[in-house]
Image: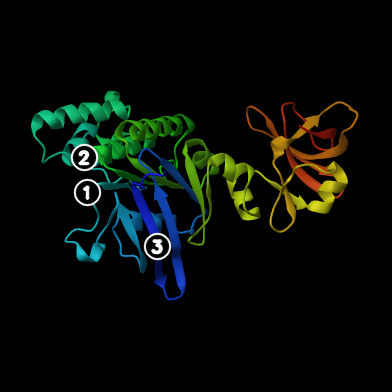
Amino acid sequence: MLSTPLFELRHISKAYQPDQPVVDQLSLDLQAGEIFGLLGESGAGKSTLLQLAANLINPDAGEVWLEGEKLPLPSDLLIPGHPDIKIVHQDYQLSATLSVRENIRYALRYYEKEFRDARIEELLELCQLQEVAERPTKLLSGGEKQRTAIARALAEEARILLLDEPFANLDLPNNRRLAETIRNSVAQTGAACIFVTHHATDALGLSQRMGILQAGRLVQVGTPQEIYHQPCNAYVAGLAGEANILEQKLVVQYFGIQHWQVLPDERVLIRPEYLKVQTVPCTGALEAEVRWSVFEGSRYRVSVHLGAIDLIVYSDKMVVEKQKVCIELT
């Protein structure tokens, strides 16, 4: 039997203009210790949804539940929000002239000194901030600021952690450090986390479950593997990663009958990694011509022309424009 969710959004809706919902009849539940990634394009309603989840703005309809209890409307509270729900905004909202330690200490200002000092040291270690603890936050990198904001949000052991575009503008090393911080924080505190992003790699890499948000609606929820390999439609397929979406009759013509992912409109999804590029003649493969090739470090991203279709494929060898190659199924 499933346990009661730690956190629920029940049929939440919000519109700023009549008949133009930003969030539309959205329901979502999280278990303790779960990291949920919300993937959507700009304007899909991600930030508004976090404001609703944080109980900072009134929904037009629907309810927010925490640990089996319905939360009162923000308009009915002296101070909107909830002490067990913490949100980290894109701009971090740190005190620029205070040090990392002082920013965290401020969140614990009403606690006894012994507990406060011990908790600060715990958070500095958890969020990998020991080396910059005494540095003013205005001198921190983007990744360090983001980890400081998370440490401050976790100071009072939040039950729900909401992150608004946490990986925006981070370089790769800081991106990875932040992902590790989020994993460790959720695992050690037993909180649940929702983070929103418009980058598929971040959602796929960090989430235990994820959802695709389109025009304020959750169009699919599942594990990262389900979203990537079994998208419910072409929009989800394209948002979740590189996708060749082709007419089924053309796929059968060139590749034969296979166990392809057939989308609702009878088109077929072929991820680039489902195909292999051979730079030498080979039997049982199809000949194609390279249109362009881009080096991406561990591989080349290649566009090829195959009969009546163009495909994006990956190659571990360098290929050049107009080169003849063979394409076969992996």
Quarter of the image with the N terminus in it: top left
Crowd rating for badge 3 (residues with CA inside 10 Å; few <14, some 14–19, many 20+):
many
Helix, strand or loop at mark 3: strand
Question: Splitting the image into 4 quarters, where does residue 45 fall?
Answer: bottom left
Quarter of the image with the C terminus in it: top right
Is residue 260 left or right of 23 when viewed as pictured? Answer: right
Q: Indicate the position of residue 168 as horizontal and vertical percent values.
A: 44, 43
Is residue 162 left or right of 102 when viewed as pictured? Answer: right
Q: Indicate the position of residue 302 as horizontal and vertical percent values.
A: 73, 37
**Which residue is tagged 1?**
83
Q: Residue at x 33, y 37 (%)?
A: 145
Helix, strand or loop at mark 2: loop
Q: Residue furthest front?
A: 1
**Which residue is tagged 3?**
12
Q: Indicate the position of residue 284 as horizontal and vertical percent values.
A: 89, 32
**Which residue is tagged 2?**
156
